[in-house]
Image (cartoon, helix red, strand yellow):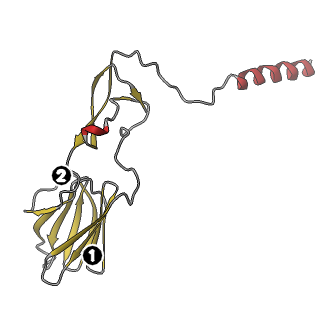
Amino acid sequence: MIKKTIIVLSIVLSIGLNSCDDYEYIPEFDVRETEGYKPIYSQEVSLVEILDARPFTNPGNITKYGRLILINENNQGFHIIDNTDPSQPVKSGFFVIPYNNNIAVKDNVVYADSGSDLLAIEIMQDGSLSVNRSGGVFGDLSGNLPPETGVYFECVENENGVVVGWERTTLYNPQCYY
């Protein structure tokens, strides 16, 4: 009896294990209306400038540089805070860098990402800046996929510009899935 039970159990297990799929679910594209993501495009990727100070909206990492504190504003650039008097820090400006998420400082140079590019912003003795851009250092980080998996999305069309974000919305006849 035990021998028969082991044989039957072995057969059932081997059938069950063989029925497992090794691939992910790929949906049919006959969906007419569904929730998903639509890319947000920008034409301008190289604009780098210093503006007046502004409020924090989506702050990221913080870097100290001499008497300054630099606070990243995700995908937009970084805030410049004068911390000469730590009891009364003063917002002194905002450095616009499109698609910036990380900053670091070494030897009077602020290094910042700008999409797939690396910027080296040298701070001169007179306070002026020299900006050098090295293109494509970080590979293709253009954001051509939505922020989550298992969703339909509007396919990216490079002729519309660079993808700078994604908007969750109702899609009609989507042709892409991630």
Left or right relative to 53: residue 175: right
Q: Name the residue under label 1.
A: 109
Camera-side residue: 77 or 174?
174
Camera-side residue: 14 or 107?
107
Tell me what residue is drawn at x 24 percent, y 76 percent.
65
Quadrant location of the C terminus in the rendered image? top left
As drawn, which residue projects farthest toward the left? 52
Q: Nearer the viewer, mark 2 or mark 1?
A: 1
Q: Where does the image place residue 119, in percent across and percent down from the top left?
A: 28, 65
Q: What element carries label 1?
A: strand
69 above or below 57?
below
Residue 120 quadrant: bottom left
Left or right relative to 156: residue 97: left
Left or right relative to 91: residue 130: right
Amino acid at dot 2: Thr
106 above or below 149?
below
Tell me what residue is drawn at x 21 percent, y 45 percent.
43
Q: How far apart are marks 2 and 1 (CA)?
A: 25 Å
Sequence-first tag of 2 and 1: 2
Residue 74 quadrant: bottom left
Left or right relative to 22: residue 68: left
Q: Which mark is residue 47?
A: none
Tell me what residue is drawn at x 39 percent, y 37 percent.
148
Q: Mark 2 points at which residue?
A: 57
Q: Where does the image place residue 56, in percent across and percent down from the top left?
A: 16, 56
Q: Is mark 2 on a helix, strand or loop?
A: loop
